[in-house]
Image: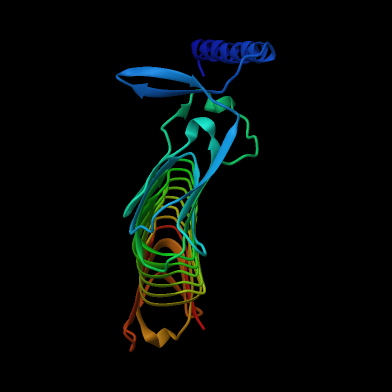
Amino acid sequence: MSTKAKTWLIIAILFIVGGLLLAGVGTAMGGTWSYSYFFKDGHINFSKNSDNYVSEKKIVSDFSKLNVTAGTVDVIIEKGADECSVFYYVPENMVPTIDDGDTLTIEVPKQTSFFDFFNFNTGESPYIKITVPSDDEKKFDISTSTGDVNVVRLSFYGKIGSSTGDITLNTTSLGDVTLSTSTGDMFINGVRSSGVEISTSTGETRISDSVIDKLVSKTSTGDIDIIGSEFNRIQIDGSTSDVTLTSTKVEDIKIDVSTGECELELLGNASDYSCKLNSSTGDIDYDRHEYEKRYSNDGTGKGTISIETSTGDIEVRFR
């Protein structure tokens, strides 16, 4: 590093340290970091956040469509006993608007913390809980930024998207669904679905005890772990992602990753599949036999296995 670059780096560090010291003095004198900003009529407006949480339960009509825009607020949707309801526990400046009807629309006001870098976790997580008594399949359109989404024991189709929040589906019956997150994780357990499409960046995906007709997963560096599940077709595209299937039944498999490892334990026999395996520098182990760089065969069954990787190892075993 040049002398000039070092000088500017030192100056930058001094400014940061000085800013933190001034911030500490201001806080000690009664100042607050809790401000939000929002845009209105072409201007930036500031408002002081409240540390007070408010809660309320509202009874709503049974609905066929659900639209939720929650931002940093967690969303829980679960099967209840008697009536449709919406319960929220949020800071008083984040009380959602709730529009009742055949389409239930819930929207949290868009406010962004101006000094998120300095905020401390108080241990309180704002959330919205939607309770649904009926088993009728509903359409979901749910969006959050840092909030988690958790769906339990419900039948639905549609899409759920989050930036850094986790998405959890537990014991649900699904039509075609699209799930997307960047750094958040996916947890899918006990799901029955005609089709699941997953998109992640660095987030992990874990699927267990599920029966899915078609799974399509696209990821960058996030790993994919599937346990005790059944599929007609799996298609996985990744970069440095590791792919692991354990005690899983699949008819058609297509995996294309760059430097990720692929380790498959399939229920069935090697003769059930024709296969094509390629790895530039990785090792290949198919049905407890080792091969270099590539292996293919024409099985007598109707199943297919196609795996392409660059530097990752490939291991396929049957039981």
Q: Quick check: can you spot residue 225?
A: no
Which is more toward the observer, 126 or 302?
A: 126
Which is more toward the observer, 74 or 256?
A: 74
- The relative height of residue 286 versus residue 299 in the rendered view (above or below) is above
- The relative height of residue 288 versus residue 91 in the rendered view (above or below) is below
Q: Which residue is at a point 35% across and 57% down the rendered structure image?
A: 63
| Figure colour scheme | rainbow
Which is more toward the observer, 304 or 82?
A: 82
Horizontal and vertical percent position of residue 210: 47, 71
Horizontal and vertical percent position of residue 111: 44, 29
Which is more toward the observer, 49 or 177?
A: 49
In the displayed orientation, state which residue is furthest to the right: 28
Name which quarter of the figure residue 91 lies in: top right
Q: Which residue is at a point 56% across and 27% down the rendered structure image?
A: 50
The mark total stands at: 0
Horizontal and vertical percent position of residue 182: 43, 46
Q: Quick check: can you spot residue 21?
A: yes
Horizontal and vertical percent position of residue 208: 51, 68
Name which quarter of the figure residue 174 lies in: bottom left
Q: Which residue is at a point 41% across and 18% down the rendered structure image?
A: 45
